[in-house]
Amino acid sequence: MGTEQRIEELEQRVAALEGQVQAQSVELKKVFAFLFDRSEYKGLIKQGKAEWPKMLTESLEKYFNA
């Protein structure tokens, strides 16, 4: 594998990781919003204006539905 090709591959991997980090940041904000004002957030979910935080769902499944 040539150096140029390896650099391109690494740049693509870095870009993918940056996207994942940004997505996690957004997901954490959703979780905090849900935890600090559950009744308001649940209302927004029912109205279709917000989604249930995936990170919270994954945590609940992992630690409480073993």
Image (tube, helix red, strand yellow):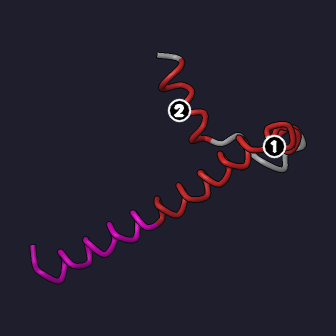
**Residue 43 picture quarter:** top right
Q: Which residue is mark 2?
A: 59
Q: Residue at x 79, y 38 (%)?
A: 38
Q: Residue furthest front?
A: 36
Q: Is residue 63 above or below residue 58?
A: above
35 magenta-colored: no
Amino acid type of the residue that numbered disc 2 sits on in the rendered structure: Ser
Q: Is residue 27 above or below residue 12?
A: above
51 on left or right of 56 = right
- Name the main secondary structure of what is drawn in magenta: helix
* SS at mark 1 in the image: helix
**Distance between mark 2 and mark 1 Cα atoms:** 18 Å
Amino acid type of the residue that numbered disc 1 sits on in the rendered structure: Tyr
51 on left or right of 54 = right
Q: Which residue is mark 1?
A: 41
Q: Which contiguous range is marked in magenta?
A: 1-18
Q: Residue 6's spot in the image, x, y percent?
A: 18, 74
